[in-house]
Image (cartoon, rainbow, N blue to C red):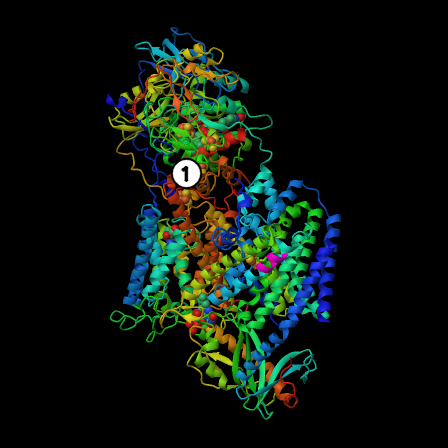
Amino acid sequence: MNEQTLWSVFVNAALVNNFVLAYFLGICPFLGVSAKIGTATRMGGAVMFVMLVSSVCAYAIHHLLILIGVPFLELIAFIAVIASTVQLVEMFIKKMSPTLFRALGIFLPLITTNCAILGLALFQTNRGYGLLQAIVYALGAGAGFTLALVLMAGIREKLELATMPDVVTGTASALIVAGILSLTFMGFAGLGA
Amino acid sequence: MTSRNRKAVIGTDEFIKGIWRENPVFVQVLGMCPVLAVSNTAINALAMGLATAFVMLMSNTLVSTLRNFIPKQVRIATYILIIATFVTIVDYAIEAISLDLHKSLGAFISLIVVNCLILGRAEAFASKHRVRHAVLDALGMGIGFTLALLCLGGVRELLGDGALFGVAVFPDGFEPWIVMILPSGGFFTLAAWLLLINHMQQRKEAKTGRVQEVPR
Amino acid sequence: MSNLLHRYPSFRNGVHPPESKADTHALKIRQFPFSPVLVIPLSQHIGAPAVAVVREGEEVARGQLLARSDGFMSVPQHAPASGIVQRIDFVPSITGKMVPGIYLKPHPGSSQEVAEGEPCDLGTASPDDIIAAVQSAGIVGLGGAAFPTHVKLKPPEGKTVETLIINGIECEPYLTTDHRVMLEHTADIYMGIRYLLKATTAQRAIIGVEANKLDAADALRAAAPDDMPVTTGVVEVKYPQGAEKMLITALLGKEVPSGGLPVDVGTVVVNVATAAEIGRLLPHGRGIQERVVTITGPAVGRKGNYRIPIGTPLRFALEQVDVSDNVSRVFLGGPMMGQALSSLDIPITKGTSGFVAFTSAETAAEEPEYPCIRCAYCVDACPIYLNPSQLGILAKNEEFDRMADDHSLMDCFECGACSYVCPSHIPLVQRFRDAKAIVRERQAA
Amino acid sequence: MYRTLVGVGMFCGLLIAIVFQGTLPVIERNRAEALERAVFAVLPAASQRTTYALTPEGEFVSDTDAVGQRVHAGFDSDGRLIGVAIEASGMGYADTITVLYGYAPEQEAIVGIRVLTSKETPGLGDKIEKDAVFLENFVALDVRLDPSGETLQHRIVTVKRGQKTQPWQIDGITGATISAKAIGEILATSSERWVPIINEQLEQLVAGESDDES
Amino acid sequence: MLVITAVAALGGLTLLLATGLVVANRTLYVEEDPRFDEVEDMLPHTNCGACGYPGCRSFAEALVNGDVLPGKCTVSSGDDRADIAAYLGVDVGAEERRVARLACAGGKNVARNHARYTGYQSCRSAALVAGGGKGCFWGCLGLGDCERICDFDAIIMDAQNLPVVIEELCTACNDCVEVCPKDLFSIHPASHRLWVACKNLEFGDDILEDCEVGCTACGRCAKDAPGLISMQDNLAVVDYDRAHGTRLPIERCPTGAIVWIEEDGHVIKGDEARPTLRHSSLPEAPT
Amino acid sequence: MSAKNKTLEIDTSPHIVSGASVEVIMRNVVFALVPVCIFSVYVFGLTALITLTAATLSCLLTEHVLCRWRGDRSTLGDWSVAITGILYGLTLPPALPVWMVVLGGVVAVGVGKFLFGGLGHNAFNPALIGRAFLQAAFPVSMTTWYPALGAERFAVLPPSTFTLPFASPVYDSISGATPLAVIKFDGDITAATDLLMGLTSGSTGETSGLLILAGGLYLIARKMMNWRIPVAIFATVFALSGVFYLIDPAAYPGPLFMLFSGGLMLGAVFMATDMVASPMTSFGCVLYGVLIGALVVVIRLWGGLPEGVMYAILFANAVSPHIDNLIQPRVYGTTERGAS
Ligand SMILES: Cc1cc2nc3c(=O)[nH]c(=O)nc-3n(C[C@H](O)[C@H](O)[C@H](O)COP(=O)(O)O)c2cc1C
Ligand SMILES: Cc1cc2nc3c(=O)[nH]c(=O)nc-3n(C[C@H](O)[C@H](O)[C@H](O)COP(=O)(O)O)c2cc1C
Ligand SMILES: Cc1cc2nc3c(=O)[nH]c(=O)nc-3n(C[C@H](O)[C@H](O)[C@H](O)COP(=O)(O)O)c2cc1C
Ligand SMILES: Cc1cc2nc3c(=O)[nH]c(=O)nc-3n(C[C@H](O)[C@H](O)[C@H](O)CO)c2cc1C
Ligand code: SF4
Ligand code: SF4
Ligand code: SF4
Ligand code: SF4
Ligand code: FES
């Protein structure tokens, strides 16, 4: 059992131990989808949504597997269930609201095979979060991911118009900015204690 | 773009390309999370690299073996299942071998499941090639990945701890650069490697006067 | 100076270039002689060129119609002097292109007498009559744009003009034409306003004067007729106060909608010199033959304000005022918005409010261009509240569509305030001109 | 399609289950050893241990399947209770710190501490694991109960290095004040909860027959 | 026992998920361009986002829509990318190659400036100031807007400040046509060899004061090739709808304003045309 | 008359310029910083002089070398890197080993400026990047403070200053804690007059708030600095900390203490105002200032670290493109703002 307050869970996941900048989770989309602010924002929203879904799924699976006595299937069950659930949601959104799909749905496949989602499921299980804590954790992690992504996108949009030296290609510049952001986020240490 | 003649591709190329030309870390920039997260020491980097390589090897083999039996619609799901299985296996194996190592790699062993690199090789390569080639490909990619991780882990451990594989390298009194072991150090080190590689590439191009096709 | 003591109304932002008007603002308007040959382009205004009604070799009298207007968006051209039509041919123009025009050789000793036409009687004429008379007098905006004035006077269907604004701002450095006109032709201005008020059916008129011309404001106020709803508003000295949008904002607190015309906020803006010309010409039914031009600048020996016949080649004009040998740049209009001349064969036209000549000594050394340091000087200067810095960066990256779509490029009216203040010496307005041209072409395509 | 997917699924299940069963004994042994090492480290005089769970009713039971928070009682070779090893955690500089500390009822003091997990900055925050002066604090850190037996007489606090004057104070670490304070907080909170309970139920903690639960 | 539970559990789970997806696929199917699926299939399905698109599917859509090139995908091998390119490229039929051609030959060695332009170095800006100061109002200002805008490096400014189109590199993208303030470029099939390299609309030898290679509208070329070449607005105009494979019209052109472009890009003038050997620029001529 | 045969020069308008230039602005910032540096040397003695010199020189040299390496002309002439160097030096602890100072200077200009494309393109404040890097790399050295007004400060150098490159510094005789650390970890408050006069331990430049304010006022008067940013920061810090002080004066420090302690003055006046990394519009600058102020208060009061000005400014740098996107001036004659 874990007794962290919800606020502390949230601040920790969002700022102090930001998923991307401190835990290195979800780096691929962080580098890939952070070139435009608009895309980054929508991606962030989609991540937050998937995190919620998978957090709830993971909570359920974890307890179910313990119940039937095969906790060692956790990893494979997590990934299979999360991936399928997200795919179902994706199809559902595509059918029901093409606009929402354009805005959020197209990011969903990208997110399922992303460390941040599985990492969230594993961490919340490791830490023994209760359902409510797990949900807040997912929200915090999603918010932190979005924040990092959007800040990154803002800077990259600006850098797109800059005359960087030839050796600095897209990925390298993104990594440098990420490093600096990570330095910056160290300032939040100790908050939410 | 001209299509290269596929038949002419011999096995060695499958092996070599992953190490340098299509290096998963430095060229394809894939699977960055474990690369950055567990490259704070050379040991971790090596272990992570080997674990990933093992999973890739096994899943590539199995996928390639089964490639003609797996229906198209469910192939991704199948690959994920296969990969997850081997990851679980590796996870338990490492835990059995060394609890400490397992602890320091943390969740990132499990996260090999979602490493884009492995699924990428399964889908892009193993599902279309014969087992022998798939194995070579996995080996090449795995070694490339491990080497890249070592490049990072080495630099980070050296500066961040003054040691390499846990063995002190600098004389006493060395002031460690703690930033290198911190997350930002991971980003900076990888960026530095990329800059170096870009620089070398450009120097080479400038020399040969040829604009290489670099994936942008 | 007076700016510091009083708070005069103004628009937001803008810049304060040195005024450089002291050399000429006290000098009375003097009459210029005729040059040996007058070069009269058929298109001295925005719109369709006039159509010549004289033949080569024909004898014309001063004030006689040389070319008639070609449609509503066009004005006629009158002979600036009595003489012989030498040639109807291509004449040099400020755009660098040769354009159709008339070479008129004045008779030696041609008098300054002008042929009378059909007067337009203020008491009896209908608004439409006045508008027609303004057109046939060949009047265009003398403020610089040379837009046919009668077109402005006729509000589009469904719009009404409430306020007539007379633009006596003259915010360009160096120029003092309007200043002198306000001092010396006060009566003509008020006569012109009477015509304009009647033509536009506006309720009132405001004469806008910058605070550096308080003597002109005093003169106008002193001479204001009691029976006219006209006031004189003094506004802050600031560039580009004279731009009609800025002036309307300063005087009325309204903003002309983007892409709209002054009439959208119930106003028409007419330059003082234009108003004076209307008041001078319409009672006699004459057409424009000359205009007041400031000739000044470090390269000019006898600076001053001159009444110069239309068509006088610049070379002749400069010779008359003892231009220095090492003149290197001549700008038509002031230094902020004026056009540089490539050749002295270009004639003075109706739109020429002044020209400024610099010697090579004033030609500043080329300053190196730095990257934009985002100092926001330009943002604080732009009277249209654009973000010239961002526009400049986008222009450098050739993101023209983004400039237009996201950053309102097309609202830029090229006042140059941003380029003026930029500490990085970035040629902002030049880039915007290029970008606007490209965007316009893309939109047309 | 179904056949492949389900087939692969079942095959995977089989594979995992086999590996799991194969490695389980080794892993369990590893874990038990690690735990044992930790427990004996924080209770230096102990040589055997029994794991208890605190049931919701507030009883200690040594049943391995019982639900409830676990503590590990350490005994010397004669079966005399040396102390109790308790796990506690709290927020450190970077992330949650988990420690195992040994409480000796006889001395009414904390007699050892071991950091189980911490992400504190290497070279700084990780001094809480390595700094000799700091660890010295935990040879006998006073957690005396006040006469009522319900709370501690003095709550544990961390003070600046060199300013320790009382046995319940922790001498901090320069340059890692935050981590050192966090340890103090963790111990204070945990001891305030556990010490009264343990003292009340001392008699339930007796040397058990099962040392290794595997 | 454990093994059986595990096998059963995973078997059940996969069965459940597969059923769910199959049912969903039936009920929630949305009609789309089939090429999306095809192209998506050729992609590696890693959904890594490295291409900058949110997942392989979006990338496939972008590929089909022509917004992006296959090389953006870093995961797939060169062969796969080639396959995709080939798949998408099928409908680009073999068309005649088209290139940009410049209608001005007035480099600084043969054409004069009236005034010295010192402002922002861009043809567009210069063109707004008295046409740029060049004697010939229609001629190239030589400040290289076209060179800068060409994304394919197909234009270089030569020593005489005239743009030269490298035909192999030119993709006929039209950018230079749009950018030139003097409208000097137009896109032509590469087979158009006969070329009028002037746009000056003035008449007579006065032109030669400003530019030694301008078209004086003498009309000899039109006489030599009646029908093919006509004089319009004081300028020779080639009617490419007729057979234009003849070099004849250039022979008597006195200035060399009409030229013949060889296959290798070499430009040939008629014998009458004064060969211009000068390489230094002409002095500025005040007017 | 020969004038008529002259070839005229033509140019696009405007034909006159205001004369403002980057060098002049940057040079004046350097002038405004000089008193701060002098005072800091007075307070900390020789070691501060060495630190400031090493910081400035390392930045200048890095810029020069990198420009040359890139094949451009050196951009030392625009004075901007001199500001970076001096400000970077002013953020460092006075007794920091010179080798660390140089390393941070290389990072400041190399990573913080050059890799981003040089002057005008850096997304973050380069001086602070140098400091943030050092803070993360050598946290102990970066939080070891040399005491102010030591008796021998002009005679004896602390042993740490000339530590061998890459070796750990020795800080034996050094003590001293910043007012912020004192209040955070011990709960004591430093006297206000000491703070105001700058007679406290701390970074080289966080000594005299009054001199910094004077420099800022000079630049504001010459319109080389946007006054809204420091004012917004001060107002926010004052208001927020004031509220908490009123709620519980025992637990929270007073607003004046908050204003004059730590790097707030230097940061708010000279570093947050770096035009390159701050928003363009007036309202955007106010928002930016409020964000920095609020972060400073949050980090100081509830965070783990005693001081948060650097992190607050870097974070706000990262937010500033978004502020610029969201807060665009409303274009004349329209009702919407300019940018999307
Ligand atoms: C195409 C065009 C149409 C215009 N139509 C009108 C009009 O209908 N009514 C009017 O009052 N002014 C009209 N104007 C004049 C403008 O309001 C303005 O006075 C003129 O462009 C000169 O302004 P400037 O000297 O500030 O550049 C028109 C201008 C242009 C360019
Ligand atoms: C930047 C700028 C500055 C201007 N300055 C003046 C000025 O000082 N005086 C003036 O009469 N018109 C000035 N104008 C032109 C006015 O906008 C407007 O066209 C003119 O007052 C209309 O009168 P007109 O058509 O009778 O010339 C300026 C225009 C612009 C774009
Ligand atoms: C990169 C970095 C890492 C840090 N890590 C720790 C840490 O792990 N534990 C800690 O207590 N303080 C850590 N700190 C905080 C500072 O060292 C802080 O100033 C110090 O704890 C204050 O203690 P002092 O007053 O004894 O110097 C860190 C600071 C930085 C910049
Ligand atoms: C008011 C003002 C403040 C400045 N502050 C900084 C600063 O904090 N850090 C810095 O590196 N440069 C600063 N500069 C200088 C300049 O903007 C800096 O070199 C650029 O950030 C480098 O591109 C400042 C300049 C001005 C005008
Ligand atoms: S030129 Fe355009 S952008 Fe510049 S200040 Fe004037 S209106 Fe604004
Ligand atoms: S005035 Fe110049 S340097 Fe300043 S923000 Fe504008 S464009 Fe940039
Ligand atoms: S062809 Fe046009 S765009 Fe190119 S240099 Fe000449 S004038 Fe400029
Ligand atoms: S801009 Fe386009 S059309 Fe012109 S030369 Fe370059 S590729 Fe050819
Ligand atoms: S490895 Fe790709 S998101 Fe983590």
Q: Is residue C393 above or below residue D7?
A: above
Q: Is residue D89 above or below residue C163?
A: below
For the point 43% across and 56% down, the residue is: B193
Residue flagged by tag 1: what amino acid is it?
Leu
Q: Nearer the viewer, residue E149 or F87?
A: E149
Residue B33: percent from left, percent from top:
53, 59
Q: Position of residue C31 (x, y in %)?
A: 32, 19
Magenta highlight: main SS: helix
Q: Which quarter of the rendering shows the N terminus of chain F?
A: top left
Q: Is residue E181 magenta?
A: no
Q: Which residue is mark 1?
A: C428
Q: Is residue C414 visible?
A: yes
Report the quarter where the C terminus of chain F lies.
top right
* Quadrant position of residue B98: bottom right
Residue located farthest toward the bottom when viewing the structure as drawn: D78
Residue C432 drawn at (x, y percent): 44, 36
SS class, disc 1: helix
Taking the image as four quarters, which one is ligand 7 found in? top left
Badge 1: residue crowd in 10 Å (few <14, some 14–19, many ≥20): many
Q: Cβ of disc 1 within 8 Å of ligand 6?
A: yes
Residue B60 highlighted magenta (yes or no): yes
Residue C59: x %, y % from top left: 38, 6
In magenta, the rendered stretch is B56-62
